[in-house]
Amino acid sequence: SIKIWNMTDKIEKFTLLGHSSFVEDIAFSPDDTKIVSAGCDGIIKVWNVEDGTLIRDLKVQGGCVRSIAISPNGKAIASAH
């Protein structure tokens, strides 16, 4: 799972659930509106930072996604397997 924290109040805002295996990496989009997560379930998930809703799943070939990076303009995601 992925936990989102409010750093001002130092409390947990919400938990992102959805990967069926370990979460290996997470990254914020350049505009801080999305979180991208990579899991050993072979799925990259894109989440809304404000309310924790799932925006989309990207199923990848090659099994476990170990690392992700988002391009500076937020239009591309790179993954390592």
Image (cartoon, helix red, strand yellow):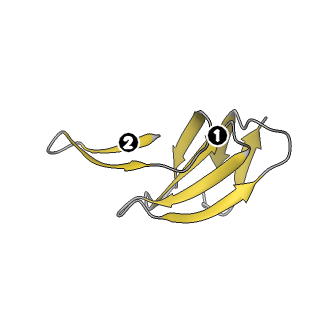
**Residue 46 horizontal side relative to residue 10, left or right:** right
- Residue 50 relative to residue 13: left or right: right
Q: Quadrant of residue 32?
A: bottom left
Q: Quadrant of residue 65?
A: top right
Q: Amino acid at mark 2?
A: Lys
Report how many numbered discs are placed on residues in the image.
2
The reply, left or right, for residue 5 in relation to residue 20 is left
Outermost residue, left side: 9
Q: Nearer the viewer, residue 69 or 38?
A: 38
Q: Residues within 10 Å of mark 2 (few under 14, many from 20)?
A: few
Percent across and percent down for residue 7 are: 23, 42
Whether residue 21 is visible, yes or no, is yes
Q: In the rendered structure, which amino acid carries the disc numbered 1? A: Gly
Q: Secondary structure at mark 2?
A: strand
Task: Determine the residue positioned at 79% across, 50% down.
Answer: 60
Q: Marks 2 and 1, Cα distance to the nearest angstrom?
A: 15 Å
Q: Residue at the front extreme?
A: 20
Residue 44 is situated, as x and y percent measured from the top left of the image, at 66, 50
The residue beneath circle 1 is 39
Badge 1 density bin: few <14, some 14–19, many ≥20, Cα 10 Å: many
Residue 52 placement: quadrant: bottom left
Q: Could you tell me which residue is drawn at 74 percent across and 44 percent down?
A: 42
Q: Quadrant of the C terminus?
A: top right
Q: Residue at x 66, y 63 (%)?
A: 75
Residue at image mark 2: 3
